[in-house]
Image (tube, rainbow, N blue to C red):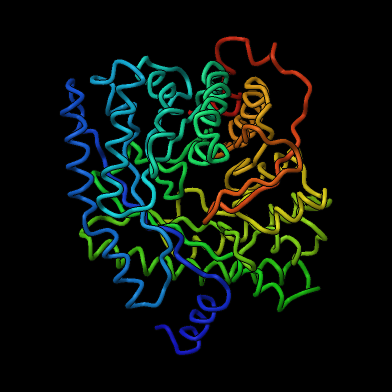
Amino acid sequence: MINMFEVNETNKMITQENLDVRTITLGISLLDCADSDLEKVAKKIYDKITTVAKDLVKTGQEIEREYGIPIVNKRISVTPIALVGGSACKTPEDYVVLAKTLDRAAKEVGVNFIGGYSALVSKGMTKSDENLIRSIPQALACTERVCSSVNLGSTKCGINMDAVRLMGDIILETAEYTKENDSLGCAKLVVFCNAPDDNPFMAGAFHGVTEADAIINVGVSGPGVVKTALEQVRGESFEVLCETIKKTAFKVTRVGQLVAQEASKRLGIPFGILDLSLAPTPAIGDSVADILCEIGLEFAGAPGTTAALALLNDQVKKGGVMASSYVGGLSGAFIPVSEDQGMIDAVQAGALSLEKLEAMTCVCSVGLDMIAIPGSTKATTISGIIADEMAIGMVNQKTTAVRLIPVIGKDVGEIVQFGGLLGYAPIMPVNQYSCDAFVNRTGRIPAPIHSFKN
């Protein structure tokens, strides 16, 4: 039973410490929408999304009102469109038609983002995959709510370096297509190694082929709650520190579990997973970097940062798995620069570099996220950064990702404003030494020896 103390404690988390359910994401399989006729595929996709998701936003709002729990976003993820459109889409322009269809459907049902404009190419690319990837710059420029992702590698398959090289070009091209909005299209494009099938967070959400026809996944977040709890044990031992994080993560996860079960019951759609990720926002007091400072660092990026982040990530997961039997997705701590005021402060103070962020990704939930870089950065340099991050994921058997934003017309030290949850970011310097000869090799990097576990 939940007692009055716990009710009051949860209310305080919500009103004073930025606790929220970051997203209810409805995953929808579009495999049954495949057809050789492009017009028919588009109609089937629109009809299925607007039918299955018609009550998603309304249901989320009802749960918010009844329980007093903020649900910031209601979103949809769909089957990777490269699989759905393969028969009908013969050119990149054909895929753009489907991107516009997704955008119209998302607008009709009222969600803020729809993910799944995606391709899975960890070992090789079909012509359909390549057409979708080449369509991404135009698709993201002409839509408002569509998010795109590409999985470039995995622990079992290695890294598809042909796709890594191509994505360097695609990211720069997306930046050019959306340069009037500070290259905002790149904020809706992420590349993965070991992408999970059930991630509810954008821009990387897609509905994996292992999933049911429709599923409810919930992402919950509470960096401010963790920081406030740690303020009460300042100077205590690591044992006390870890126990405090673990207990707080448990409480936060229980809130998400309640929302997930309610949404599942009311929509008549099975509950999939609960993603407990400390996902920051630009709001003051809602920062993962601030937690690291509370643990004992002057700034995120100081010596000890990677160890502190590893501790935080591990204890969040340990607390979460005790609160729900179905913790999944990414779950842990996110370190996006533009969405975390503490990270922005660390960059501006000179404490945090791209290289230190890469080291931190070895122990956090995702990777190099929402990092603005000079618009003059070469495509091969972007591909080299991607390859490094894919290697971390492949060798460490974890999900890693890259969401870089080369801001056309801006250089190191300038500030770029994205707005809303995407925040703002100082443009960070990038290593200027060439990796052209490495990136321009063809083929793939093979899977590591420890992938052979049969």
Residue occupying image coordinates x 65% and y 33%: 409
User: Closer to the camera, 297 or 363?
Assistant: 297
Relative height, residue 454 to residue 166 (above, below): below
Asked if residue 226 can be seen in this view, the reply is: yes
The N terminus - image quarter:
bottom left
Relative height, residue 40 to residue 257 (above, below): above
Q: Is residue 278 left or right of residue 271?
A: right
User: Closer to the camera, 360 or 89?
Assistant: 89
* The quadrant where residue 32 appears: top left
Residue 359 in percent (x, y) is at 73, 41
Q: Single out the residue that lies furthest toward the bottom.
A: 4
Q: Is residue 39 left or right of residue 176?
A: left
Residue occupying image coordinates x 44% and y 34%: 141
* The quadrant where residue 441 appears: top right
How many numbered circles are shown?
0
Asked if residue 335 can be seen in this view, the reply is: no
Q: Single out the residue that lies furthest toward the front.
A: 180
Residue occupying image coordinates x 29% and y 50%: 215
Residue 183 in percent (x, y) is at 55, 37
Relative height, residue 199 to residue 94 (above, below): below
Residue 412 in percent (x, y) is at 75, 38
Residue 176 in percent (x, y) is at 54, 28
Q: Is residue 75 left or right of residue 366?
A: left
User: Closer to the camera, 143 or 120?
Assistant: 143
Q: Is residue 405 left or right of residue 430?
A: left
